[in-house]
Image (spheres, helix red, strand yellow):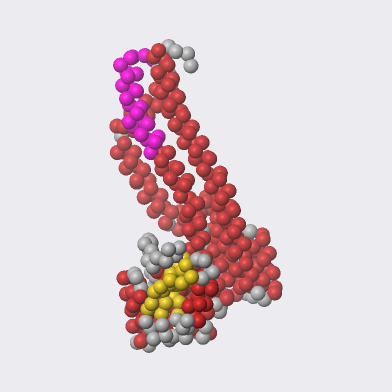
Amino acid sequence: MPIFSYRATTPDGTIIEGVIEAADEATAIDRLKNSGIIPLKINTSSKGTKRKFTLKSSKTDMLTFTTELSALLGAGLPIDRSLNMLAEISESTEMKSVIHSILRSIREGSSFSDALQQHPKVFSKLYVNMIRAGEVGGVLDVVLDKLNEFLESTRELKEQVFSAMIYPTILLITGGFSIIMLLVYVLPKFSTIFAEMGTSLPLPTQALIKFSNIMKTYWWIILLSAVSGWFAFRNYVRSKAGRYRWDAFKLRLVGDVIRKLETARFTRTLGTLLKSGVPLLQALRNAKDIINNQIIASTIDTVVKGAKEGKGIAGPLSNANVFPPLALSMIKVGEETGQLDTMLLKVAETYEKSLRTAMKRFIGFLEPALILGMGLIIGFIVLSMLMGIFSMTDMPL
């Protein structure tokens, strides 16, 4: 039976840590609750270890904060006491400072959402609006649960995309490094031998030696040009027109993957907001901010306009022609049955699964394409060197 390490709090606010044996995580949580303590964090631990070394980020800190606050409020503790406990147990110095600031604002008379709004670098507009909707509806603990699910699913999706790109990136770096080593260090040794022999070299060998000499002599110019080009490209992409054209190019290049990614992001965000009680127009504006591709994001303005005019969102989204047909059909069904929020979350689940499949296909094509490209370049370099050697000895190829 698996062993889980846990961090929990007693009703009087004492933080305790330990391990528990249970069939699964849900059973472990139930057993802890039945014993009279409030579980804050549960981790699988095959050897009962209490501490893990991980790379923490602000996103991880925010997810931990949301999970633990949801558990405390769900157990019936007041918001100020819950925040005070979180400030004491937070492992991040930055997050501890933020929680103290939020607690201070609440004690001065601000609402929880207004206190969060004072830290825009930590809590997004979407996060603040969901908390505000939970405060108005008196269901803050429920909204925090939904926020926790949303943040968890978003993180998993990002990690899957990131993990899928690790191998192609390593392959590109190592292949590029190998080619540079051949051109800058290996080929010049052969070019010295060719020069001493004074024989006429084949055209590919001459071109390769000339290119190698240019790289070796003017490497600093090439490096400076590459760095300058990168900064110029980055500044161009940051401009409104440049970002729009770059996003349009990406849509033409890998449109299927991008559409599925943005569909999953948009529908999960919108569905979570609507489920939490955020008004439709405000939810649409918040969901627009989640979309990275400006071509797709710009079409949401027409959807907002259509929603204002009472046309719903299925029709305007269909007219925009940027989301997949299956997603549009599911959204239309959800709108007609009055279950738009539930259907949007189902669309998100469908396209997150579809995105994983599309990413596998894309990586499955990209990896052999990179290997073939690197192989052709290295093969050309090696063949050109051999042609030069054969020409010196008059050996037939």
Q: Give the range drawn in magenta.
A: 177-200
Q: Where is residue 114 in the image (x, y as percent from the top left)?
A: 41, 80
Q: Main secondary structure of the magenta part?
A: helix
- Does residue 371 lie above or below 23 as drawn? above
Q: Does the magenta stretch include residue 184?
A: yes
Please tell me which residue is depicted at 37% across the width and 66% down the height of the picture. 51
Q: Where is residue 282 in the image (x, y as percent from the top left)?
A: 53, 75
- In terms of depth relative to the viewer, which is nearer, 311 or 83? 83
Q: Position of residue 69 (x, y in %)?
A: 44, 78
Please tell me which residue is depicted at 55% across the width and 79% down the height of the picture. 277
- In terms of depth relative to the viewer, which is nearer, 201 or 295? 201
Q: Where is residue 329 in the image (x, y as percent from the top left)?
A: 68, 64
- In terms of depth relative to the viewer, which is nearer, 51 or 254? 51
Q: Is residue 92 visible?
A: yes
Which residue ends up furthest to the top in the rendered image? 394
Please tell me which residue is depicted at 36% across the width and 62% down the height of the picture. 53
Q: Would residue 367 appear left or right of 5 to someone viewing this image?
A: right
Q: In which quarter of the image is residue 181?
A: top left
Q: Quadrant of residue 17?
A: bottom left
Q: Is residue 124 visible?
A: no
Q: Does the magenta stretch include residue 190?
A: yes
- In terms of depth relative to the viewer, which is nearer, 337 or 154? 154
